[in-house]
């Protein structure tokens, strides 16, 4: 069982759990404490990353597009260790696409994705439920400001 709880007042309406302040979060995997370290969730996509630390492991959830995030067995930059992608659907449900082995033709070998344990999968689902999936890119935000400012 994985739980991520907010302790204290809701400070962010744009985040399902209501905060991106690590000191206001308590997380557990079965009977073990898990540290959850969300980014600030501001202008840049990378600021929407969430890192989870449990035992001697690190897992991260980071946006890939406006509605999709990647769940990684490692730090945010280690995309070759991607478990899966979570995508928000129009009806509010989340679609999961698990990674499959990929042949890298330039290097001539196959990259095998890590195989998640049941606990890994539950952590990924809990992070996606608590923090949402995806993020706007800085380019999208700027283009929105520009189009809003144009007379029309």
Image: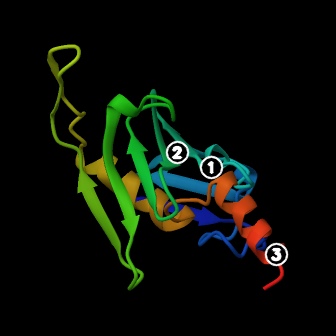
Residue 93 pos. (x, y %): 36, 78
Quadrant where the N terminus lies?
bottom left
**Separation of residues labelled 1 and 2 (CA atoms):** 24 Å
Q: Residue at label 2?
A: 34
The reply to whether residue 112 is in sight is yes
As helix, strand or loop, the secondary structure at mark 2 comes to strand
Image position of 107 (left or right of 46): left
**Within-10-Å neighbours for mark 2: few <14, some 14–19, many 20+:** many
Residue 8, by quadrant, is bottom right
Residue 152, by quadrant, is bottom right
Q: Residue at label 3?
A: 150
Image position of 105 (left or right of 2): left
As helix, strand or loop, the secondary structure at mark 1 comes to helix
Which residue shows up at 58% across the image and 47% down it?
49
Vertical arrangement, residue 14 with respect to residue 55, above or below: below
Q: Residue at label 1?
A: 45
Q: Mark 2 and 3 residues: CB-CB less than 8 Å, in contact?
A: no
Which residue shows up at 28% across the image and 61% down it?
96
**Separation of residues labelled 3 and 1 (CA atoms):** 25 Å
For marks 2 and 3, the one nearer the N-term is: 2
Which residue shows up at 34% across the image and 32% down it?
81
Q: How many marks?
A: 3
Which residue shows up at 47% across the image and 65% down it?
67
């Amino acid at each position: 069982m994985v739980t991520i709880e907010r302790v204290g007042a809701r400070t962010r309406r744009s985040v399902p759990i209501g905060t991106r302040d690590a000191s206001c979060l308590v997380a557990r995997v079965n009977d073990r404490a898990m540290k959850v370290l969300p980014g600030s969730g501001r202008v840049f996509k990378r600021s929407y990353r969430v890192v989870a630390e449990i035992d001697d492991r690190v897992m991260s959830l980071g946006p890939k597009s406006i509605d999709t995030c990647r769940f990684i067995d490692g730090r945010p930059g280690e995309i070759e260790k991607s478990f899966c992608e979570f995508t928000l659907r129009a009806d509010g449900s989340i679609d999961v696409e698990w990674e499959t082995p990929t042949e890298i033709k330039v290097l001539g070998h196959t990259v095998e994705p890590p195989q998640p344990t049941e606990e890994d999968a539950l952590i990924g689902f809990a992070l996606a439920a608590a923090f949402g999936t995806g993020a706007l890119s800085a380019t999208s935000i700027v283009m929105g400001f520009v189009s809003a400012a144009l007379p029309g």
